[in-house]
Amino acid sequence: MLSPHGVVMPPLRSMLANIGSQVVEGTLVPALIFWSMLHLTGLVWALLSGLAWCYLAIARRWARGTTLPAVLVVGALLFTTRTGVALAFHSTFVYLLTPTINAFVLAGAFAGSALLRRPLTERFARDFVGLPAHVTALVKVQRALRRLSLVWALVNIVNGAVALQLLMAQRYDAVMLARSLMTPVLSAVAVLCCVLMGRHALRAEGIHLHLRWRDQPA
């Protein structure tokens, strides 16, 4: 949000709590369910159980009348596609290969957007921070957004490369564990880069970024 005194971000405490809950709900829990059911009942029930969790999370939010995060909806759609492909081939390798390929595709999208000078991170800055178009269009802010797109490209390359190496070694448990732990950590590092580099770019343009841990009591 832009104020007369600069950019006021939502409280970091609420932002981190929201991100953390979405990571747990959309990544850690379905991965744990899939891994557990794979060893207990086999591939088919593991796939169906993980898919059922995703749609249960959506149904729970819908029943409560709360907003459905785009991350959760997109994640459920991707999970549905992965499950359908894996069931068709009846292969754990195929199931785990799909998100690995997606990581490289995302890396290419982020890197390509930076090279084309239309960084994807500009959309994130508008959606999550509320930066208006005339602020994201500033020269130094645009430069930072392009560099941040390259940061996210690197995150996805590392994520995909590690998973691919483990897949080729057929260490499926290690793939699930690495993806569940590494993805949140790398994403957190990238988010920190966004905050620090974005703050520096805004200050260079004479705009102060207001950061606070939580809302001040009335």
Image (cartoon, rainbow, N blue to C red):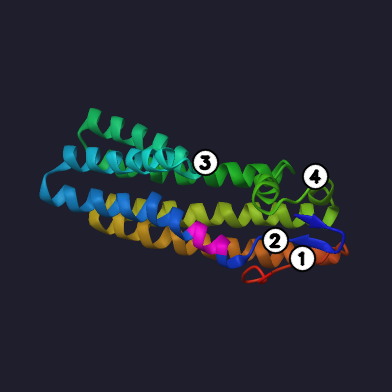
Q: Are marks 2 and 3 in contact (CB under 8 Å)?
A: no
SS type, badge 4: helix
Indicate the amino acid at tag 2: Met
What residue would you read off at disc 1?
209
Q: Reply yes or no: does residue 16 show up in magenta.
A: yes
User: In 3D space, how far apart are the residues under numbered discs 2 and 1 (Cα atoms)?
Assistant: 7 Å
User: In 3D space, how far apart are the residues under numbered discs 3 and 1 (Cα atoms)?
Assistant: 26 Å
- Circle 4 or circle 3, nearest the eye: 3
Work out whether mark 4 precedes mark 3 in sequence or the reverse, and give the earlier one. 3
Work out whether mark 2 precedes mark 1 in sequence or the reverse, and give the earlier one. 2
What residue would you read off at disc 2?
9
Q: Are marks 4 and 3 in contact (CB under 8 Å)?
A: no
Indicate the amino acid at tag 4: Ala
Span shown in magenta: 14-19
Indicate the amino acid at tag 1: Leu
- Picture residue at 85% right of the left edge, 64% below the top: 5
SS type, badge 3: helix
Q: Are marks 4 and 1 in contact (CB under 8 Å)?
A: no
Left or right of 83 in this view: 142: right
Residue 4 seen in the current view: yes
Q: Reply yes or no: does residue 29 show up in magenta.
A: no
Indicate the amino acid at tag 3: Ala
What residue would you read off at disc 4?
133
User: In 3D space, how far apart are the residues under numbered discs 4 and 1 (Cα atoms)?
Assistant: 16 Å
Examine the image and state in which quarter residue 206 appears.
bottom right
- Picture residue at 11% right of the left edge, 45% below the top: 41
Image spot of residue 108 (x, y percent) = 56, 43
